[in-house]
Structure formats: structure tokens, C-alpha cells
Image (cartoon, rainbow, N blue to C red):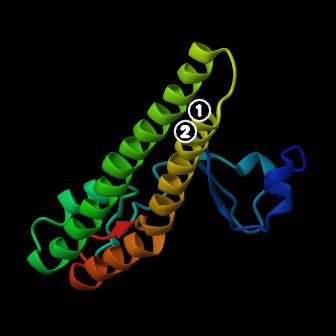
Amino acid sequence: MADMRNPLLWSLSLGMVLCSEVGVCWAEEPGAQSAASTPVEKCCPAPVASPEKPAPCPVYVSDPERLAALTASDPVVFERADSLASRDNYYRRLLVPSGLLIGGGLILAGTLDRFSNDQWTNGSKWTVFSGVSVAAVTLLISWALAPERDDLLTVINHWNLRHPERPLAP
């Protein structure tokens, strides 16, 4: 009979083998008394390696530049990844800063014109308005034309189809 003082052993059926945290197992024999429970060393079986290889852990990629660097060994996928990285660099690192600098310069010129004349003139108003417009249009264009997450996923999926032994994940 199971030991009534140990709720875990009591709740399990007789004949179960439990491995404790320290590697000692308690075995209950059918028909044995609770005092007959004795620790048995190393009764837990060693894990058996499966005949199949475990799935390799994917490399997580969220940046098109890193994706291009990781796919450099495959010319077909690298061409797509490099194109994606080039588009991302162009829109994020060239178009946005230049548009914001031009727009900010026009806003600054219109504001300085206002302070030099002590009033808003038509020229200073239009200069500030054109600066805000240039900055806003630049941000909208870069947002609309920049590569999307789907573009990144397309390249990752293409890589995973060609190289299942080295998967990438977004």
C-alpha cells in the first residue's frame, strides 16, 4: 500500500517509479508495506537519442542588412536580400534625412525672415509652409516605398526552402 503520509506517492498507483530532484528514485512494489519503500540509486533510465536529427535552431533576423550578410553564401537568395538591404538603406538613410534637412532648412529660413522683419510676410509664411510640406511629403514617400515586412519574409522563406539545415526566422 502507498505511504499515506506522502500525498504524491499516495495519489499515484502502486508500481510507479518516481525520480526525485536529487536523482534518488522511490519504488513501490505491489503488495509491499509503506515501510518497505527504499531509495534506489540510478533507477532513472538515461535519455535515448532519437534516430532523427533534432530540428536546428533558427537564426532570428529583423534587419535587411543582417539578412544580406547571412545569405551571402547563396547567390540566388543573396541577390534578393542585397536588393532589399539597398532599398532599406536608400529610404531610411538617404531620403528621410535629406528631406528632413531640406524641410527644416526652409522652416528655419522662414522663421529667421519673420524675426528679421518683426512680422510674418507672405514670403516667410510660404517658406515655412513649403518646409513643412517637403518634410511631410518626404516622410510619406519613404514610408510608402520602403521595404515591408512581407519583403523580408519572402526572402527568409526562399532561404528556408533552399537551406532547411540552416533556417532563418523573422
Residue at the bottom extreme, as displayed: 161
Q: Is residue 11 above or below residue 79?
A: above
Q: Amino acid at mark 2?
A: Thr
**x and y, in percent, of residue 77 in the image:** 19, 77
| Secondary element at tag 2 | helix
Q: Is residue 116 above or below residue 66?
A: above
Query: In front here: 91 or 154?
Result: 91
Is 36 on the left-hand or right-hand side of 48? right
Residue at 29% x, 82% y is 158
Q: Residue at label 1?
A: 124
Say if residue 3 shows up in the picture: no
| Residue contact at pointers 2 and 1, CB within 8 angstroms | yes
**x and y, in percent, of residue 73 in the image:** 9, 68
Image quarter where the N terminus lies is: bottom right
**x and y, in percent, of residue 40 in the image:** 54, 48
Residue at 58% x, 24% y is 111
| Secondary element at tag 1 | helix
Q: Residue at label 2?
A: 127
